Image (spheres, rainbow, N blue to C red):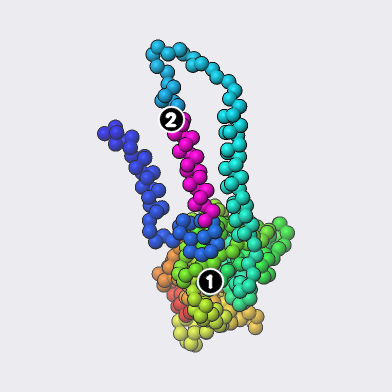
Amino acid sequence: MRRITRLAPGVGALAVVAAACAPNNHQDSLNPQGPYAQKIDTLFTPVFWIAAAIFFIVEGMLVLFAIRYRHRKGRPQTPPQIHGNSRLEIGWTILPALILVGVAIPTVSTIYDLARTPTGNVLNVNVVGHQWWWEVDYPDQQIVTANELHIPVGEPVYVSLCAAGVGYGGVPAPNECQPGPPKGAPPSAVGDDVIHSFWVPELAGKQDVVPGRTNHLVLQADRPGTYTGQCAEFCGLSHAYMRFKVVAQTREDFDAWVRAQQADAVAPPAGSLAATGMNDFLNGQCIACHAIRGLQVNGQPLTANGGPNLTHLMSRSCFRGCTMPITRANLEAWLRDPQAVEAGSWMQLNPKLSQDQIDALVAFLMTLR
Ligand SMILES: [Cu+2]
């Protein structure tokens, strides 16, 4: 029984490690799916094996010496003290230095290689980290969406990373985060000035998203597919829910997606429940934060202020940082009490919505295809 209790923590730890290896979780940095992730893997593999060899040689000698020269009866308490073997000392100083230089050369060159701004057929995307979701903005295509980054396969994507908060001035200019009003001014976008980290393990390395500065990352997918990413820097209460998806498509599929996203939202037929919902949307609290392309209030287009752009909401598969499928039930739960669905949510409903308003709003949101 005692042996079992002693083994339990080890078995538990092994189970946790094994769970991380579950197939199809698409968060595998050892499974590169594009040239940028491949470069990192190409560097990682030899460095890993060099480190593994050194580990086993050093630890092996430690164990060997501990056993071989352990204290035994009949031997003197203090072993003979030997000083100074110049050859050995020079050898074990130079050899590690050479190994480090051998590791440093490809490492530094890969760092510079990955940091280079891509040229040619490049897709520019600005990604803004909010608490706790990702805004995805295509400056050249004039599209703003959330939590799903669509990219064409075989083309480098130059991602400019900004953090929402007091020091952030709204939608970023191409490849550059727009500086916001100084500290102390009212927030221009909902979310505190916190650091996030943008990470799609199968497509690229990890890059911090830092308030007040623009960081860049290049990613590229070789094959169509969906690649999962997540915020990799603790950023507040619902950090665990801050995921996203990269949807890699053929050029034709990507172009079709762009055209669909560029279209205005279609107003629901007059007299329908959805039309009532649209009316509630335009005359209620929603427009304080959310925009829908094509809708106007007093002749002015809506501008997003901290909340996701909802123009083609139903073309996405997920919300709440891409951890909840967009379904009628989930949208209802969200509108009923956002804080119950996402701890610390910035979506404040005051007053709370009535069941009739929720029904109408959900009917309207579900027309946004
Ligand atoms: Cu986070």
**Which element type, helix, strand or loop, lies under badge 2?**
helix
Residue at left 46%, top 56%?
30
The image shows residue 239, relative to residue 12, as above or below, that is below
The image shows residue 217, relative to residue 101, as above or below, that is below
| Residue 134 lies in quadrant | bottom right
Q: Main secondary structure of the magenta part?
A: helix
**Image mark for residue 294:** none
Does the residue tagged 1 have its C-beta within 8 Å of any atom of ligand 1?
A: no
Q: Which of 88/113 is in front?
A: 88
Q: What is the three-letter code of the residue carrying label 1?
A: Gly
Label located before the other in sequence (2 or 1): 2
**Residue 334 pos. (x, y %):** 47, 66
| The residue stretch that appears in magenta | 42-64
**Residue 339 pos. (x, y %):** 49, 60
| Residue 263 lies in quadrant | bottom right
Q: Is residue 46 left or right of residue 115?
A: left
Residue at left 42%, top 18%?
71
Does the residue tagged 2 have its C-beta within 8 Å of any atom of ligand 1?
A: no
132 falls in the magenta region: no
Residue projecting furthest to the right: 182
Q: What is the three-letter code of the residue carrying label 2?
A: Val
Residue at left 58%, top 25%?
85
Residue assigned mark 1: 154
The image shows residue 131, relative to residue 60, as above or below, that is below
Residue assigned mark 2: 63
Could you tell me if residue 289 is visible in this image?
A: no
Q: CA distance from mark 2 to mark 1?
A: 50 Å
